[in-house]
Amino acid sequence: MAYIIQGDTGDWEIVIGLEVHAQVISKAKLFSGAATEFGAEPNTQVSFIDAGFPGMLPVINEICVEQAVRTGLGLKAKINLTSVFARKNYFYADLPQGYQISQYDQPIVGEGELILDLPDGGTRTVGIERLHLEQDAGKSIHDMHPSKSFIDLNRSGVALMEIVSKPDLRSPEEAGLYLTKLRSILRYLETCDGNMQEGSMRCDANVSVRPVGSTELRTRCEIKNVNSIRFVQQAIEYEARRHIDVYESGGEIRQETRLFDSVKGETRSMRSKEHAHDYRYFPDPDLLPLVIRQDFVDGIKAGLPELPDDKKARFMAEYGLNAYDSGVLVAEKASAEFFETVAKGRDSKMACNWVMGDFFAALNATAKTIEDPPVSAANLGQMIDLIKDGTLSGRLAKDVFALMVETGKAPAVLVEERGLRQVTDTGAIEAAVDAVIAANADKVAQVKDGKTTLLGWFTGQVMKATQGKANPAMVNEMLSKKILG
């Protein structure tokens, strides 16, 4: 996806790498038994370990290890059977230990890949550099008192997977596609819920620019903790243009960490970018190297679900759908399952059109979720059956669908209650056709003189006269015979 920014001195391209912090789905924290439930009262889910009490020893949570391996396998990545936890030393008020337990030079997951689904139906592969496990910090709250900050340690010690991409992304749009696809994979795997609004998936964006045609990697800036895909895209766009303005005015970019102000739509400096040696990484003396067996990895791999890329390929092969439609349907596991329920044993392309058209529109209009849909998959499938057997025309089906959304009733019930059955009785249709022809002799003459486009107008009049219940194909055939002979 070529994305070029025109500057005063020439054309520039953006180089983007993303670091995603994904909160692991686990009932307990990474090194303690404290709960991880979102929304609990402040400081009610904190163990002595999370609070940094002296002498408290961390104990690894096997479920978190399993979730990291599961995610690595979902990203087609190398699983390292031996990895090491290290202490990342820095001081901040919401980090009571004075260090974060993370992984440095020996992560649990190595290189992998993620396939972007492009808008034109094509794909592009983005490299994954690594995935490592680490504990989250607490939360500082600055807006509850005019002169004091509050600290909530509920999040302290919660397991995170930091998923680091290679600098392979070249536009804000690609960054958005990457985050969307990564979130989809995590949800399929059930290793992270991907709820950015709750902070369980956060993104740091590393941004630099270079002249088009150059292969050098210039100085980058890191935009920290952006909490929506739209804001990530806005932050990248702003930061890239800032870099270009600096270079074109003769300046140099300083490596630093920046924050994105979503109200002003701009980034601002937070601190100079720390290097690894500033954190004084060293292996955590309280934790032995993490050693896992190959059969442990193989067992997890055997239990992986069908992931979006494989499901997309199957939808194209099995249902005859195009790449774009398949990609949309498999983006969320629930929407893929909904479609398959509707399409089973039916016209799959018709099912796809109804799901992606009227059904998705109803989801948006009613603000419901696909888990609690405005129309059930069973009822939508039954409505397609009624179209296929001639009970409903396409026009009547639209009316029935709207009533299904409104009432929650089954389509067959609504057809009987509202008298919406399609008229296929030849005599009834012929009477309506004859009446319209008789009332519009001038237009009949125009059709006979060669203005055949008017036949569509006649069809509309007949459908109007029959309240949309006449079979359109029968109407068209009858009009042609009666007017053109």
Image (cartoon, rainbow, N blue to C red):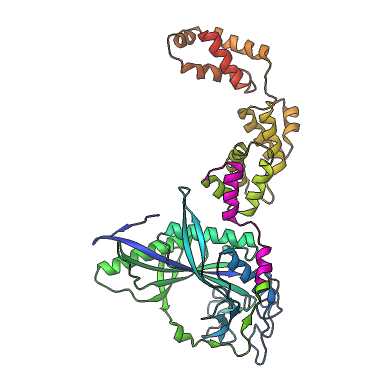
> Is 93 colored magenta in this rendering?
no
Please give the name of the residue rendered at 63% of the width and 81% of the height, measured from the top-left corner.
Answer: 290
Q: Is residue 138 left or right of residue 175?
A: right
Quarter where residue 321 is shown: top right
Instruction: Name above or below for residue 244 compared with residue 412.
Output: below
* Magenta stretch prevailing secondary structure: helix
Front one among 36 and 150? 36
Instruction: Name above or below for residue 429 compared with residue 61.
Output: above
Instruction: Name above or below for residue 438 compared with residue 378.
Output: above
Quarter where residue 375 is shown: top right
Q: Position of residue 397 (x, y in %)?
A: 64, 31
Q: Position of residue 33 (x, y in %)?
A: 71, 79
Front one among 263 and 127? 127
Please give the name of the residue rendered at 57% of the width and 12% of the height, measured from the top-left corner.
Answer: 436
Front one among 402 and 89? 89
> Is 300 colored magenta in this rendering?
yes
Q: Is residue 192 left or right of residue 223?
A: right
Please give the name of the residue rendered at 67% of the width and 37% of the height, measured from the top-left corner.
Answer: 346
Q: Position of residue 150 (x, y in %)?
A: 59, 79
Q: Residue furthest bottom?
A: 55
Camera sees residue 264? no
Which quarter of the rendering shows the N terminus?
bottom left
Q: Position of residue 428 (x, y in %)?
A: 67, 13
Please give the name of the residue rendered at 44% of the width and 10% of the height, measured from the top-left corner.
Answer: 446
Tell me which segment is drawn in magenta.
Answer: 296-322
